[in-house]
Image (cartoon, helix red, strand yellow):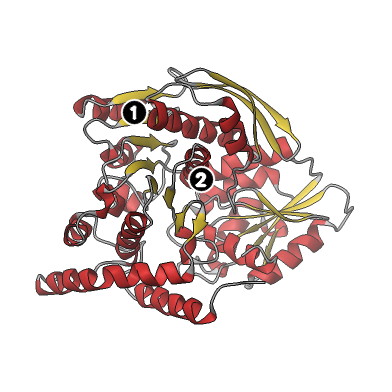
Amino acid sequence: MSTEDPQALAEAERIYHEILSRTPEHDFDPTIERVRRTVDLLGNPQHAYRVVHLTGTNGKSSTSRMVERLLREHGLRTGRFTSPHLASVRERIAVDGEPLSPEAFVAAWHDVAPYVEMVDAQLDAEGQSRLSFFEVLTVMALAAFADAPVDVAVLEVGMGGEWDSTNVADAEVAIVTPVAMDHERWLGHDLTSIAEVKAGIVKDGTTLVSAIQAEGVESVLMTAAASHGSRYVREGVDVEVLDRRVAVGGQLLALRGLGGVYTEVFVPLHGEHQAHNALLALVAGEVLLHGGGALDAGAVEAAFADADSPGRLELVRSSPAVLVDAAHNPAGAEALVAAVEEAFAFKRLVGVVGVLADKDAEGILAVLEPHLAEVVVTQSASQRALPVEDLAEIAQDVFGEDRVHVAERVGDAVALAVELAERDDSLGAGVVVTGSITVVADVRALFGRD
């Protein structure tokens, strides 16, 4: 039973919808100057704590959560800013691992509202739009972390890096997860262009920790580190995943960090990609806490054993198993299918897929097709969702008409997928829901995971 004050909860919802009326986070001006004006008026709260900054294409939220948990295990008070959210916008701004309470969310808004209004007025006089939804949330997060106060803030970019709102902060550690094609409209139509935008989070003196990257991406990051006099730590060269074994409920890892080797580290998350995310988190912790020296093995084990990543290959029902995963691009879909094949022994797997209109629906479906017996296409409640009839047409081209089913409502899609999965034999049947964070959020709510 919720202990949240109904009045505070209602006020937090009102404020959220007020902010939501602004320019949405997927439609914005690629500049940080608007946010910089606002935080300058606030006294630059982002300079009141140390910062770990994350960019990349996939794995940012999972890695953010593992970094934050590791730092907290070492006694630091933490802030975590991630996006998007699954059930409540307050998930995006967490202090000590917990989403802001309704009261704290309301207080954060009232702290920044006068300054937001001042900048809005300046922008209006200049013929520009008001601060966007994501810009306002970023300012609220930075202010809330200073008010807490936190020792370290873990900030995930909303998109890109160079002109992302979060880049008003100067990070001690910058993490770049694998860079792949996504958000081409804003970031560019090749990996090098995308990497150049993401490399913008590297500042003078930053330690850059990078996942294994494509050659062109590697060159961009190396150049960025050199130009800023930054230490460059590369997975596969300086640090690595030495070993990983599937275990009940997750995997056991051996990780070589900067400070030494950590063995028998249990991570309750599925998929090889999560092992690499854990390595990046570990190295960030080594750098921030000990300048690259070894961490206490017991603290590392405790932190990673308690790691979670809602909506990322999460089991929301058993018999038949229903998994949800927020893969929203082909690279994410590839990680999903590899993890499912490794961790689950499905004899028959049916997909439920809903995709946002600006995503590569055909690319996602093409990755999933060899692994799904049938697919049910649907659309989430998001205004950005690709209409189900359009998605169905794409799916039929990829799967063939006989393997494609259509359900406009997400709940109906899941029910149909369960029925299809169990059609021949319930033993070994499974359903995977994927394609966007919004369809995953809808399904988690159906199963009471909000």
Return the residue at label 2: 65
- Asked if marks 2 and 1 touch (Cβ < 8 Å), the reply is no
Residue 298 lies, with reference to residue 334, above or below; the image says above
Residue toward you, 210 or 16: 16
Task: Look at label 1 and name its amino acid.
Answer: Gly
**Residue drawn 41% across the image and 68% down it:** 105
Return the residue at label 1: 216
Residue 232, image x and y in percent?
33, 24
Residue 215, image x and y in percent?
37, 25
Q: Secondary structure at mark 1?
A: helix
**Residue drawn 67% across the image and 43% down it:** 370
Q: Is residue 130 left or right of residue 379?
A: left
N-terminal label among 2 and 1 = 2
Q: Nearer the viewer, mark 2 or mark 1?
A: 2
Q: Secondary structure at mark 2?
A: helix
Q: Is residue 115 left or right of residue 431?
A: left
- Rate crowding at label 1 as few (under 14), some (14 to 19) or many (20 or more) other CA atoms within 10 Å: few
- Rate crowding at label 2 as few (under 14), some (14 to 19) or many (20 or more) other CA atoms within 10 Å: many
Separation of residues labelled 2 and 1 (CA atoms): 28 Å
**Residue drawn 17% across the image and 68% down it:** 119
Q: Is residue 103 visible?
A: yes
Residue 97 lies, with reference to residue 292, above or below; the image says below
Residue 118 lies, with reference to residue 338, above or below; the image says below
Q: Residue 302 appears in which quarter of the rendering?
A: top right
Task: Look at label 2 and name its amino acid.
Answer: Arg
Q: Is residue 210 visible?
A: no
Residue 393, image x and y in percent?
57, 62
